[in-house]
Amino acid sequence: MVDNQIHTPGMNSGSTVVALCGGIGGAKLALGLYRVLDPNTLTVIINTGDDFEHLGLYISPDIDTVTYTLADKNNQEAGWGRRDETWNFMAALAELGGETWFALGDRDLAIHIERSRRLKAAEGLGEITADISSKFDIAAQLLPMSDDPVATTIQTSAGRLTFQDYFVRLKCEPVVEKVFYEEAHSAVPHAEVLASLHQADLRCIVICPSNPFLSIDPILSVPGIRDTMVASPAPVIGVSPIIDGHAVKGPTAKMMAELSLPSTAQAVAEHYDELLDGYVIDIADRDNSNEMHIPVRVTRTLMNSIEDRENLAREVISFADSVKASDNNQANQVDTAC
Ligand code: FO1
């Protein structure tokens, strides 16, 4: 349901929105934005640090999670993979003694096999992602952060692990000591990523409530993306992935404790530092809102229902418009003062 109040840009705001997203929590807000905005005005920049080669296939989990979610084909319970899935391939693989720790459903397999075939035919990840989006009638623009490989690896008490080894095979149990984004220095942002961030009518940039270290930092590690966001006149609004000291899903709070950071909404805002123009936190963290040195919007950020996703998206957009309006007012005051 496109919301006219949100859909109609404010007098001082543009009409396009860019969201940085990875993982399950991020995809929930991406869906909320997709449903309340004109979907043609939304660009989602997706983390590819989770990507890996498995069983001879190139797997891009966060691109698939966002794609299935916006196409309404996703498995709501798991948060990843497809709905109405069957597991005959995995059962047959088990008979052969194949690796079954990473579950690939029969329908889900098609996207991995088709993406792998097209990558081998030298198509770019962004081109393939756009084509799959259009085959699924997704009106938003879905972009990988780069066509170049950037692999998230994790130095842990169990040694240096690839992302999926840590996240799925070892269930996030090893103690995290440091996170790396391999080859980020030589990666180039996807051309459409920089174009989306340079749009003249950019209303705001949203950092979704994803794991900052595993889903957002890989995107920010690609040279040029963070600087473009900092320089953008559009407000950058972060949504806290931590509610009352806990992550809604996944290892964010555990990782923060292991990295000697307080697992609080405020600590995540401090991690993003000068990138943020505004920060959205949950009502459970209302008392901490005055400890933050940037504008804060307090609202319900837990997203159980579709309405929760849409309501949070509306709050984020209206908050961005108000941050932009107050920036304009301050700029005008400075003009009149001097
Ligand atoms: N996550 C799991 O915890 N267990 C799995 O077996 C699993 C399989 C899987 C298959 C395809 C896919 O696109 C995602 C999958 N995920 C699985 C999620 C994956 O680990 C993602 O990296 C997480 O969603 C974090 O972004």
Image: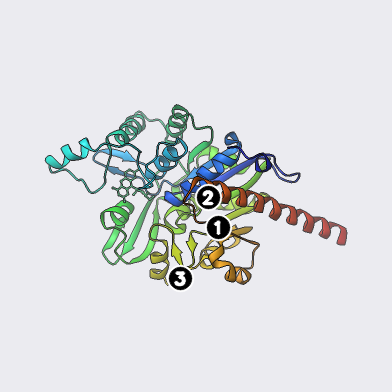
Question: What residue lies at 37% left-to-right and 42% top-to-bottom?
Answer: 75
Choose the circle earlier in sequence order: 3 or 1: 3
Picture quadrant where residue 336 is located: bottom right
* Residues at marks 2 and 1 touching, judged by CB atoms closer than 8 Å: yes
* Label placed on residue 48: none
Question: What residue lies at 12% left-to-right and 40% top-to-bottom?
Answer: 95
* Label placed on residue 308: 2
Is residue 279 in sight in this rendering? yes
Residue 227 coordinates in the image, percent (x, y): 58, 52
Mark 1 — residue? 300
Residue 225 coordinates in the image, percent (x, y): 54, 49
Residue 123 coordinates in the image, percent (x, y): 40, 30
Q: Please, what is the three-letter code of the amino acid marked with disc 1?
A: Arg
Mark 2 to mark 1: distance in Å?
Answer: 8 Å
**Which secondary structure, mark 3?**
loop
Choose the circle earlier in sequence order: 2 or 3: 3
**Which secondary structure, mark 1?**
loop
Mark 3 to mark 1: distance in Å?
Answer: 24 Å
Relative horizontal placement of residue 125, taking residue 278 as reference (left or right): left
Mark 3 — residue? 261
